Amino acid sequence: AAEPLKADREMVLEAVCQNGEALQYAAEPLQADRELLLEALRQNGGALMVPAGPLIQDPLLTEEAVASNPFAVRGSKCPVCTVFDLDAVGGSIRFRAAWGLGGTELGGDLPCESTVGDLGRAIRAQVLDQNHYLYLILPGSEAPVSPFMMEQPLADLVRTNVK
């Protein structure tokens, strides 16, 4: 590919979404892009690619973590879910969310020790199969969560209610 295309993140992401091996032809800085590597690993499984440099130690780029991560990589074409309530209720965390442009309401309860990734997987289980990813927008934010926030404790983001 022409050199300018190899350095175009959107173009590389599109190629990697079709075939993870395309990452090896990207400009060097993009080969070290954590999100692009995550997408490449998703497309080709962990067996074909091994993160290089400091990314080799990244626990969120292991084969198991990649397989369980429900969140879309920035720039992907994926559905959006907006969480509008996260509340601590008794011994659990209750969530309410709107799915897509139609605003289909979703909700549920998760254990207090749940993570942002657990929330994403719970929402995905209600509307998508396991092979799809989603953008998740949390209360008070306008931007979707990063795939690398999946280990963040959900309790850090909830408000406490007495019910």
Image (tube, rainbow, N blue to C red):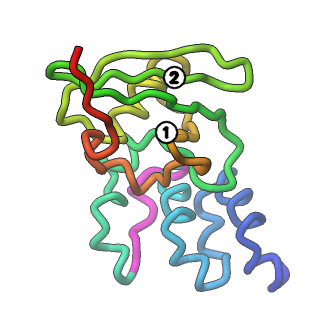
Residue 65 is marked as: none
Relative to 107, does residue 151 appear above or below in the rendering? below
Q: Where is 80 relative to 20, above or below?
A: above
Q: Secondary structure at mark 1?
A: loop
* Disc sitting over residue 129 in the figure: 2
Residue that extends furthest to the left in the rendered view of this protein: 91
Q: Is residue 104 magenta?
A: no
Mark 1 residue type: Pro
Mark 2 vs mark 1: in front: 1
In the rendered image, residue 24, in percent from the top left (x then y), is placed at: 60, 74
Identity of the residue drawn at 67% across and 76% down:
25
Choose between 48 and 79: the one closer to the eye: 79
In the displayed structure, does residue 11 sit left or right of residue 156?
A: right
Q: Amino acid at mark 2?
A: Asp
The span picked out in magenta is 43-52
Report the front residue among 7 and 151.
151
For the residues bearing labels 2 and 1, Cβ distance under 8 angstroms: no
In the image shown, does 13 or 127 lie closer to the viewer? 127
**Magenta stretch: dominant SS?**
helix
Location of residue 139 in the rendering, given as x and y in whole percent from the top left corner: 49, 39
Q: Position of residue 79 (x, y in %)?
A: 65, 33
Residue occupying image coordinates x 60% and y 85%: 28
Residue 159: x, y in percent? 31, 35
Depicted 79 relative to depicted 148: above or below: above
- Mark 1 residue crowding within 10 angstroms, few (<14) / some (14–19) / many (20+): some
* Residue nearest the viewer, comparing 129 with 50: 129
Q: Check the image and report above or below for 115 versus 111.
A: below
Residue named by callout 1:
139
